[in-house]
Image (tube, grey):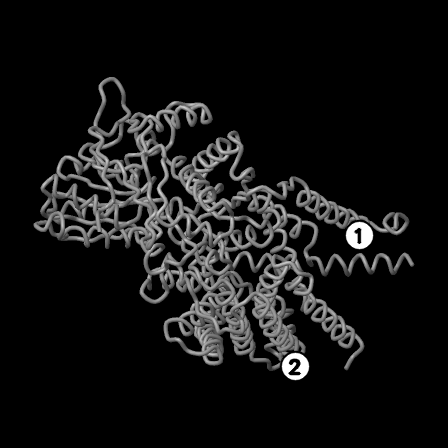
Amino acid sequence: MKRLIANSETKDKLGARTKVAVAGAAALSVALLSGMGSAGAADIKIGVLYPISGGGAIYGGPAMRGHDLAVEEINATGGVLGSKFVTVARDSKINPAAAAAAAKELITKEGVNVILGGLASSVGLAISEVARREEVIYIATIPKTIKLTTSKLHPYVFRTASNTDFEGDAMAQIVKKVNGKKLCDIQLDYAYGHDLGDGIAKALPKHAPGANIVMKLRPKLGATDFNAYITQIMGAGCETVVSGLWGNHFVNFAKQAAPFGFFKDHVYITGGEIASHEVASKLAGDYPDNVWSNTYELWYHSPTGAHKKFQARLAKKAGTNATAMWPVLAYNGVMLYKAAVEKAGSTDAAKVIKAMEGLTIDTPMGSLTVDAKSHQTNTGQFWGPMKKQSGEAYRRMEPVTFVPPPSK
Amino acid sequence: MQTGYKTTFWISCAIVLLLLLVPTLGSKYLIDLTTEILIYALFALSLNVLIGYSGNISFGHAAYFAIGGYSCAILLTTYELPLIISMPAAIILSGLAAAFVGYFCVKLTDIYFAMLTLAFGMLVWAVAFKWRAVTGGDDGFVGVNVPAFIDNRYGFFYFTLFVVTVSAALLWLICHSAFGRTLVAVRENRVRAGFVGVNTTRLRHTAFVVAGTFAGIAGSLFAMYNRGVYVESAFWTESGQVLIMALLGGLYSFFGPALGAAVLYTLQVGINQYTEYWPVVLGIILLIILMFLPDGIIGLAQKLRSQFSRKA
């Protein structure tokens, strides 16, 4: 071959290209073969799906920290039924098709005993469908769409997150508290936004029968320009706004609405965990007045001694005292599975399902009970107004009120 | 039958026979992976009719994949129609949609054609996203009913293998017919082909419909395999992915795109197990193709073979 290559410049180029291509393929093969995880035969494998790349990584990253904390704690105390928990994590990417493929791979190749995680509602539903088909338990730790535990419920799906009906009910209670009459409803145009809008509409007659939604707006998921919506709300004459704009959607909305004096004229009641450290730290001094919102956890508010200890461990792991909210959700999911396996005395899915139905566990946020029929835990949230603190730009919830899920 | 065709036929038969043995290996994962690869291989083969044979680059091919998927899912689940009606109806709908879109697209050429396919593709995505009552919107259409005989891993694998084999055979016949040959002539020199009496616009339109129809078959299989269809299936990134599959395998070879689909999908699944940086790897793969493998893996194999045969 060497002689042939030397004979012609064209062939020389061809040979060089070929070599590079073959070298590239070899490098990829090596990359594929390297880094293979290992787990002992007796280990209990936990499949985890959070978005750890792209736009969802700001939520998935902290969630993984909470998950790892739980697994470390369990293994440090000898594991469960004499077996260690081993995490097999995959990137769900906020893409249901990718998450479904990854869930299938976790089950059929890695042989995981359970799947935890999900973030977007669509991803939660996709993973749940795989769990149903493969007959493996899925614990949804973050997705909130009500369908997961109602119209799409099956024996293998459980949820430790709150849901859009719980969130809507709490928001209706706050509407009553602030004596809201004319409401504008602004939600993102996707599963979570639609379901939260429905949840609020369902709860208003119960808690605030005098309140009416006079305008519904649905900006698209990922929207960054809210000026058209802001002026529409200001022209509609509503004194209260109910919303579910989360994360950067709210950050952009708040920054664009503030110059109009929007937050002086409106009480803004919002789901989407806008009271979380993630949003409060991002907006800091730009966080507007008159905002009532929710969060699962607050690093500066410990309702239980267990939370204090949990937060201290988390702060050590994260390297900061002001910790994110998402870890506790992932942490609770692992702890629920651990308790169910211990109660069942086995990792057999049918036995664990039976053990999980009606099970109560202690978490950093208090006790959680799994409803035997709906497979939904009674996860409440902290709600309250976000107040300025003297000497710091960072707003804190004050007073902090725990709103439990509505009674049936 | 020409000698080259005979060889292709026997190699294809051998591959199908080997694939038939996959379930006997006892790995559920391997069965799933092979099923997914078969679906994407058909998707990539369908695109190659448009790109490899007629020389029209489409950035909206995922639209027909999604239309096939959504139609099949909705007919099977919402209307509870049997598979024998749902799947053919979904394929016909994909073909009709391609006929409609293609009518406008083939009036343009080159980058304008590509941009119009992208625009129509995103239109389909927007409809799937907004028509929540029918498609499930962002939730996706989850929980597709499938008949009992394919409601298990093994049944679905053999069903997919059968459908993909028949579809690939049909595509091969189409591409190697007088129609396919004329398409290549149009690809090589549209003006000259027009001068010798070929109705290039009609020919390109037919290629568009053929490509859309077979993408619809792949989409139907995808919906049934996943028991769900999602809006992401219609997004432009999906069109981009299948384009890279075709490029990787080799555009000017019939089976190249299928090989590209197998390699790219296996790499994607494999790499995702070890790192979240798949997009970086995808970028590197694309760079390697464009810089060093313009004719894809098949082109590389042909070059290597030619080098070795010269040496011998």
Quick one: quadrant of the N terminus of chain B?
Answer: bottom right
Chain designation of label 1: A
Q: Identify whether A64 is placed above or below B178.
A: above
Which residue occupies 59% across, 52% down?
Answer: B269
Q: Residue furthest top?
A: A391
Quick one: quadrant of the C terminus of chain B?
Answer: bottom right
Residue A7: x, y in percent? Answer: 88, 50
Q: Identify whether A82 is placed above or below B203.
A: above
Asked if marks 2 and 1 fall on the same chain, the answer is no
Residue B303: x, y in percent? Answer: 78, 58
Asked if labels 1 and 2 touch by Cβ distance under 8 angstroms, the answer is no
Disc 1 marks a residue whose amino acid type is Thr
Q: Residue furthest left?
A: A210
- Front residue of A372 and A221: A372
Inspect this view and state whether residue B104 appears.
Answer: no
Q: Determine crowd level at label 1: few under 14, some 14-19, many 20+ residues with C-alpha closer than 10 A.
A: few
- Front residue of B175 and B22: B22
Inspect this view and state whether residue A367 appears.
Answer: yes
Comparing marks 2 and 1, which lies closer to the viewer? 2
Disc 2 marks a residue whose amino acid type is Ala
Chain designation of label 2: B
Residue A144: x, y in percent? Answer: 34, 48
Q: Is residue A358 left or right of residue B206?
A: left
SS for callout 1: helix
Residue A214: x, y in percent? Answer: 13, 53
Q: Find disc 2 in the rendering and name its residue.
A: B178
- Front residue of A177 and A79: A79
Q: Identify whether B53 is placed above or below A383.
A: below
Q: Is residue A1 left or right of residue B149?
A: right
Q: Find disc 1 in the rendering and name its residue.
A: A10
SS for callout 2: helix
Which residue occupies 15% across, 50% down?
Answer: A204
